[in-house]
Image (cartoon, rainbow, N blue to C red):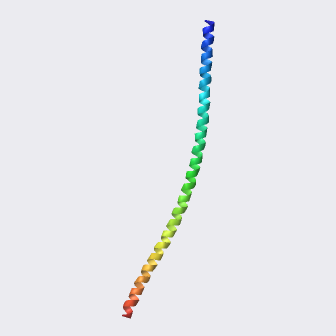
Amino acid sequence: MNRRTSAQQDSLTRLLSDEFADAEALKRALRTEAARADRLYEALAVAASRMEVAAADWSISGALALDKLTYAHQMREWSEHAREALT
């Protein structure tokens, strides 16, 4: 009976040791994934910031282009009025 108890304790000790090793490996894997997630989050934050800057640049460029287009259209109307006035 004593040998049986000792064998059961050894088996239980090995099982617990294996479970502990598995838990440690899982903890390391989770830390690695957390570090990857942090780097991904940082990259996404940088990309979002760049997109905001690009959108602001596009908005300014778009507004300037619209102003130039409006001015060109106005110049065309003025030149047509001038041509009509001369004829």
Residue plotted at (48% across, 72% down): 65
Which x, y percent locates residue 67? Answer: 47, 75
Question: Compared to 7, does 42 lie above or below?
Answer: below
Residue plotted at (47% across, 76% down): 68
Residue plotted at (36% across, 90% down): 84
Quarter of the image where the N terminus is located: top right
Question: Compared to 7, does 51 lie above or below?
Answer: below
Return the residue nearer the eye: 29 or 73.
29
Quarter of the image where the C terminus is located: bottom left
Residue extending farthest to the top is 1
Asked if residue 77 lies left or right of residue 64, the reply is left
Return the residue nearer the eye: 52 or 30.
30
Which of the 4 image quadrants contains residue 31?
Answer: top right
Number of numbered discs overlaid on the protein picture: 0
Which x, y percent locates residue 30? Answer: 58, 37
Question: Compared to 50, does 60 lie above or below?
Answer: below
Which of the 4 image quadrants contains residue 80?
Answer: bottom left
Which x, y percent locates residue 22? Answer: 59, 28
Which x, y percent locates residue 11? Answer: 60, 16
Residue plotted at (62% across, 23% down): 17
